[in-house]
Amino acid sequence: MMNPVLRREAITSLRGWKNYAVLTFYLLMMTLGAGIFFYASVFQSYRFAFDPQTIVYLYVVLAAIQMALVVLSVPALTAGSISGERERQTLDLLLVTKLSPFSIVIGKLLSSMAFVLLLIISTLPVFSIVFYFGSVGIGALLGMIGFTLTTAFMLGGISIFFSCIYKRTVVSIMLVYIITGVLCFGTLILAALHIFVRSYQDPSMAEMIVMLIPNPGVGFFSLVDSQIGTNITQEVLYNGGNGTQSSFILWAAKNIWMLHMAFQLVVGSIFIILAAGLINPVREHKQKNKSTQTKKKMKKEKKGEE
Amino acid sequence: MLEIKELVKKYGKFTAVDHLSISVGKGEICGFVGPNGAGKTTTMRIMAGLLNATSGNVIIDGVDVTKNPRALREKIGYMPDFFGVYDNLKVTEYMDFYAGAYGIPYKERGPIMDNLLEIVDLAHKKDSYVDSLSRGMKQRLCLARSLVHDPELLILDEPASGLDPRARVEMKEVLKQLQEMGKTIIISSHILPELAEMCTEVCIINQGKLAAQGSVQEIMHKLSQKRIVHVRPLKEMDKMLQILKEQPLVRAIVENTKDVEFDFTGTDEQLANILKQLVVADIPLLSFKEKEGNLEEVFMQVTGGEGV
């Protein structure tokens, strides 16, 4: 049976104008990106003509715009999911049903993920320009969609978590953006500092990879990099790291995007579980019961020792 | 059906519910009455599994809500005092959503929804958007929602609040119907006199404590400082007054043109004895009845005069 929250969200969101506005804006941005790319390619060309060999960069531009739009839109779509229910005074009505807090949170997350999927599917005609000229396969596009969805999953999970804590949606959105900023720039600064501090002692490539795994920008760049065969990420990490490396480290340096996707799934899941715990009205009691049970056990053990 | 034992709920130093113990039998309608901040909503939220109790137990059909709230979701229908509705959702979709949330299979939902909308008199509004309904209609829709899984116990927190007199009457009609269906109902309200006639039992709560529990009549008898008796003889008014004045338990006799009212401080047996004396004295009586006391007065007395 379909998650009732997802079903209801699908009905209500598609009846409103907001999602259509987001969809229109999204498509406009993608089309504009493609247009600017063609315009720039023609004017940069020596012969004032479009060079089909540069089409691979259109794929990169479109993927980057898509990624940026998803990063911006997912918090806006999900950060009000639980606080909105509280504001409307409908959360209690949901919590007294047989739905578990986890399925309520999952329903909310899936509804925003479904909308992100709709956004991605709606941009396929724009991506089809790339396929018209060739150079990037369907597998690469599916990989990109998968990466975008895991990003949406992580950001959605964090947004719902904050939505459970803060009453104001804007606060939740801002916090998610701050976290995204820290992941994007904070990890880069950390890695740069690490290289700077340990420059005389050959910084380890494994440490660099660990520091950069949480970075969505590095993950995205690594994916595009491996798809178009430039392998810049690998070279940068080879140069940054010291001499001999294990085969796993070499694989990780090449496929840092895979590790980032795994990181996103883990972080997203943790935040979803935490969010479910936050809206569970009886969580304190469970904890209380557990602590009472633990105390009882301890007492029994003490008695046994005596 | 419902047993609350020594229930306590504290918010820091403030005690919202203070060692409350209540028992409600199956099929009964229990009116939960008290002034603002008495702890009615807190108690109801604990019953519905939306709030943890500091201590004590709420046992519904043999299962403790404070220990296993999720197990009782099927048995309880809860209607909060304040609630909202979703935008862009039709009445049938709203009902379908909650039916799904209670795990009712898709095929079974249609007849259940039709029946419930019929009960709350919203069948003609099934294709309307919920946010376009009037407040009274929304209240009735919320009541239908709380019945979607056919619960045994209904917890209704101020279901008639904010409704105009007509909507209140309509809500009362629906509740009467539910009473006939054999549902156990816990209903909180500020409008005790309106509820009194349909409640089999009333619990008056004040400052988190149970001030009085019992049937409306029992509470009236227990808490009324005086009983007013109205007597109307066909004739022999003077003879009747003479007998009444001789009674030590009769006070403040008010003589009207055709009838008499007096305050009585004795028991039912002693009152029956006065009636017997009047009959033996051959006074033709048209009526001899105890006047119904003012429930609101009793409520004010119990709650120490705090606003209704």
Image (cartoon, rainbow, N blue to C red):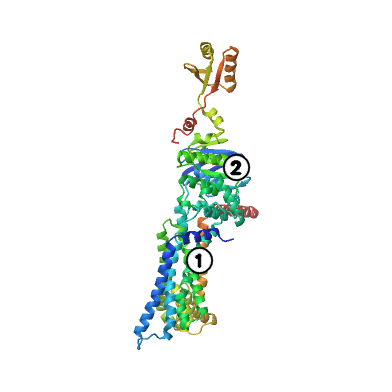
Give the numbered dot on residue A114: 1
Q: Amino acid at mark 1?
A: Ala
Q: Amino acid at mark 2?
A: Lys
Q: Is residue B287 above or below residue B2?
A: above
Pinpoint residue B72: horizontal percent, then vertical percent. Answer: 60, 49
Residue at (38% x, 79% y) in the render: A37
Give the numbered dot on residue B183: 2
Marks 1/2 in contact by CB < 8 Å: the verdict is no
Question: How many numbered discs?
Answer: 2
Pinpoint residue A250: horizontal percent, then vertical percent. Answer: 51, 82
Residue at (43% x, 75% y) in the render: A64
Q: Nearer the viewer, residue A203 or A3?
A: A3
Tell me how far mark 1 sits from mark 2, CA to CA: 41 Å
Q: Is residue A177 visible?
A: yes
Chain identity of mark 1: A
Q: Residues within 10 Å of mark 2 (few under 14, many from 20)?
A: some
Residue B19 horizontal side relative to residue A55, left or right: right
Q: Quadrant of residue B152?
A: top right
Q: Residues within 10 Å of mark 1 (few under 14, many from 20)?
A: some
Q: Quadrant of residue A60?
A: bottom left
Toward the right, the furthest residue is A304
Pinpoint residue A227: horizontal percent, then vertical percent. Answer: 49, 81
Give the numbered dot on residue B300: none
Q: Is residue B38 visible?
A: no
Q: Is residue B58 above or below residue A43?
A: above
Pinpoint residue B294: horizontal percent, then vertical percent. Answer: 49, 29
